[in-house]
Amino acid sequence: MNGRVPVFEALVDAFRAPDLRFKILFTLGMLVVFRFLAHVPLPGVDQNALQSTLANNPLLNLLDLFSGGGLAKFSVVALGVNPYINASIIMTLLNQTIPALERLSKEGEYGRNRINQYTRILCVPMALLQGIGVSVFMQRSLVIPSFGFDDLGLTLSILATLTAGTLLLMWLGELISEKGIGNGISFIIFAGIVGRLPTTVSQTVEVQENVAILVVYAVIAIAVIAAIVFIQEGQRRIPVQYAKRVRGTRMYSGGSTHIPLRVNSAGVIPIIFAISILLLPSQIAQYFTNSETDWLANLSQATLATFQNGFVYNSLYFILTVAFTFFYTAFTFVPNDVADNIKRYGGFIPGIRPGPPTAQFLGRVVTRITVAGALFLGIVAVMPTIVGDVTGVQTLRLGGTSILIVVGVVVETMKQLEAQLLMRSYEGFIR
């Protein structure tokens, strides 16, 4: 087959392979199950009050994003995979601070399986805590009739349902990763974002009558997606040479490889950290705006007014995103460990001495490329507000977190299909 094969022809080739066809259909089937569960609301939910609450609460909108749209109806999977994501982030940070976990993470597949099991266990209390927080807020917003010790039966049933829903989605995600295509947890979030897109686009077309503005918005969207793909796939490759080694009576020839250092190795985690911390003061202040203590009420109102200022909000959002990008990268990439592994296997970076000089070199390179990645994430974070203000389109926003997740899932899935197709001598999606 000569020339570039269109996407639909590659999909046809994928469906011709029985095992690959099963993976695709299995993934689609699990996503159908998830979307069905996302439309099963908890008993007693006032949908009108829920929609009004979501419209005026950015934090709940963020949680709805990571619930895959389940929170929009306060369904049995309202918490989504957010507790699992939080547990994974906590375990990633603990791996670098607790020596026992750090040693366990270096024990290959056995260590990874143990850490994954700890993550699943940690997901349960995280789901309970988040379920309590969301339910209390929903009860105060009159979305659910009651929650607390006054109605213990309903309270326990809500918490049990929300926790079970999270564990069920976690299981579905792991099934997709094991038997389907792509990362299951990311696919669940992806399905929720894409599922809401048709409704959002139709509302935008109905509200916005200026066709030229919509065309400009579409052009900006395409340019943004292209830039995200370019940055997400960007990496600095550090060459590594391996010398010849003699073990017993056998000689192993040397070789060369490279260390791929991604421009944005932190993904969407810094944006999640930044917006969670940024929204926390406003959420706390809302509870004290009507306080009988004058200074507390005034402080709460001043806090709300400060964070409602667009310039202040976006400036802090940008700064926090950049700061957390450096913070998370420092935790996940440890130059000393990489340098020790290279030295242990007889490798070296050309022109750099093994050991501490290699670690220093890697640290400088990571810092330089992280600057570009951090600025990129900062721009992506504040971009929805800027584009919305420039074009006047407020109903459809180029959400930074949403686009990063969608683009990341699509690109990774295409790569996996590419690898599967190449194994069967087919021409894939990406050149």
Image (tube, rainbow, N blue to C red):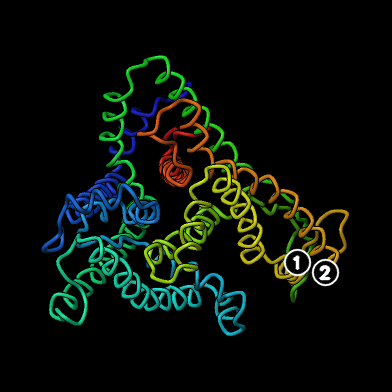
Is residue 367 positioned above or below 295 on the image?
A: above
Instruction: Give the mark count.
Output: 2
Helix, strand or loop under label 1: helix
Q: Residue at x 20, y 62 (%)?
A: 76
* Chain-order first, disc 2 or disc 1: 1
Helix, strand or loop under label 2: loop
Q: Residue at x 61, y 43 (%)?
A: 376
Is residue 392 positioned above or below 78 on the image?
A: above
**Along the line of sight, which residue is nearer the eye, 209 or 230?**
209
Quadrant location of the N terminus?
Answer: top left
Q: Amino acid at mark 2?
A: Gly
Q: Is residue 346 left or right of residue 136?
A: right
Q: Residue at x 70, y 70 (%)?
A: 337
Q: Is residue 236 left or right of residue 227?
A: right
> How far across and how far down the image is residue 182, in percent?
39, 51
Image quarter of residue 7 = top left
**Along the line of sight, which residue is nearer the eye, 69 or 307?**
307
Mark 1 packing: few (<14 Cα in 10 Å), some, or many (20+)?
many
Image quarter of residue 326 = bottom right
Q: Which residue is mark 2?
A: 355
> How far across and how far down the image is residue 295, in percent?
50, 68
Query: Residue 219, which numbered label?
Result: none
Q: Which residue is mark 1?
A: 339
Q: Amino acid at mark 1?
A: Ala
Q: Is residue 103 left or right of residue 392?
A: right
The answer to whether the residue labelled 2 contacts the one labelled 1, judged by CB atoms less than 8 Å apart, is yes
Q: Is residue 381 left or right of residue 31?
A: right
> How far across and how far down the image is residue 29, in percent?
21, 50
**Could you give the CA–CA distance between mark 2 and mark 1, rounded to whole angstroms?**
6 Å
Is residue 150 positioned above or below 58 on the image?
A: below
